[in-house]
Image: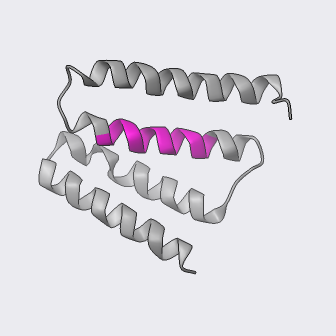
Amino acid sequence: MQMNEAFEEEIFGLVCYMLTSACNLVHETKSYGPLRLIDSASRLITILSDSDVSSPSLEKIQEEIERGKLKVMQDELQFSAFLNDLVLYAVSLIEK
């Protein structure tokens, strides 16, 4: 199955973001790794939604990501708690 050009461009952009993030993380603060991962998840959800492949559960997860991702800049313990809560929230959506 061939991707349409716009979708391929969005996916390529995300992959490049992830690759450059991996490269930069070698020298960045360790908490940036989880931030980059959840940001990548949010970007993927946007790409899927823009391509009419959306899910209410994914959109709820994205809302939670966007609401809490900047906690990394405030307090590492709060950010860690946010990540744990995010995982539990995602699991709760799977179980429904």
- Residue 23: image quadrant is top left
On the rendered structure, is 86 left or right of 70? right
Instruction: From the image, give the main secondary structure of the stretch colored magenta.
Output: helix
Range covered by the magenta-colored residues: 34-46
Magenta stretch contains residue 39: yes
Q: Depth check: 66 or 1 in front?
A: 1
Q: Depth check: 66 or 3 in front?
A: 3
In this view, 77 is above or below 7? below
Q: Quadrant of the N terminus?
A: top right
- Residue 7: image quadrant is top right
Q: Residue at x 20, y 39 (%)?
A: 73
Residue 80: image x %, image y %?
21, 55
- Residue 85: image quadrant is bottom left
Residue 77: image x %, image y %?
13, 55
On the rendered structure, is 52 left or right of 73? right
Q: Residue at x 46, y 71 (%)?
A: 91
In this view, 79 is above or below 81? above
Residue found at the very far front of the displayed protein:
1
Q: Residue at x 83, y 28 (%)?
A: 4
